[in-house]
Amino acid sequence: MNFDLSEEQRLLESTLDGFLEAEFPVASVREFYDGDADLDPGLWKGLAEMGVLGLHLPETYGGAGLALLDLQCAAERFGYHATPGPFLGHALAGLAIALAGNEAQRERWLPRLASGEVIGSVAIAEADNRWQPEEWNQTLNDDGTLTGSKPHVLGGRSADLLIVGLASGELGIVDATQGQVTAMAAQDLDHTRRVATVEFTGAEVDRLPQGAAQSERLRDAALILLAADAVGGAQRCVELSTKYAKEREQFGRVIGSFQGLKHQLANLALDAEPCRPLTWYAAYAWDNVPNEAARAAAHAKSHVTDRFLQIARDTVEAHGGIGYTWESEVHYWLKRAVFDRTYFGGPRAHRRRAADLAGW
């Protein structure tokens, strides 16, 4: 039995690494971070031309027809490079329509999502940190329109299409270009993934027929992609810490020769490495082991994002005083770790879900 990625998945990772290192290195991340945009048009166009935006969408609608494990490979590399933009929301919007939409909805939206012509996102969360489908209480007006607000919408100011979470776990499509939808920038910590509060004032909603049946599955995919981003970010933190330890000198010696720092770096690697197979299995189970998928996703999100945050904090410490400054690059991954840990619910909520699913 093969417990590793396939050659094609390894090629996808290496191709993305080469593209991002060449087209959007850390210097570009810094420039983007200091700006106010949701995405970089050149980067988004490049990802679309590579087919990354439609990896998980059916070939019939212009996608590559690949599995969630392939999509998580891309998410992992985005975490490694601190790649900016609304990739997560866009991927989930396409997945929602592919899973829960009818033929007309798929034909209308999926080809344009796969090509990047339309930017999608999900408006899922509600006030008081209610992320889970069973917690949504947003209802439609008598005429089927939507009035209300949704916080924490990834790339909300740039989105052309929103998948909205509704009461009873239902899902609906909202064309965000209509006048009844307004997105306002919200305070965010991770500037590589801007969020907005979206206000709906009588916006038309096109319900997804299988929304209630597929909303939990959509949630689980989101958890896995966040865990994958955390895997990539944790890997980068370990590499940054090791590189710095080999270069920085103190008292005439490289600091990597100090026993205390050696132990710290070893602990970073030991924390990071088991996160990868945990996330790979969750992505595999999502497609192939339905009776274990929800629990595997909850385990991956809760454990991996928790570990990423601790690894990022230890990375800052390993860099000493420079690690606490804006000029150091390590704060990009620290803030990314906070985002991954809190978005779609924190570790405590998903550990509780995993325990319930296991019958504890």
Image: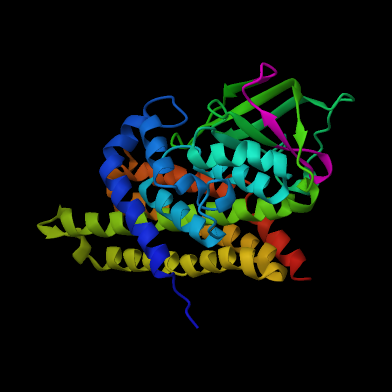
Image point (58%, 57%), residue name: 301
Q: Residue furthest left?
A: 252
Answer yes or no: is residue 337 visible.
yes
Q: Is residue 242 left or right of residue 67?
A: left
State the image coordinates of residue 212 (x, y, percent, origin top left): 80, 48
- Asked where in the image residue 255 lies, by quadrant, the reply is bottom left
Q: Position of residue 196 (x, y in %)?
A: 58, 28
Image position of 319 (left or right of 77):
left
Q: Residue at x 32, y 64 (%)?
A: 265
Location of residue 240 in the rendering, given as x and y in whole percent from the top left corner:
29, 54
Residue 310 in view, yes or no = no
Where the C terminus falls, by quadrant?
A: bottom right
Is residue 78 a member of the stretch shown in magenta? no
Point out the stretch of residues depicted in magenta: 164-181
Query: What residue lies at 69% left-to-right and 30% top-to-bottom?
Result: 174
- Residue 175 part of the magenta-drawn span: yes
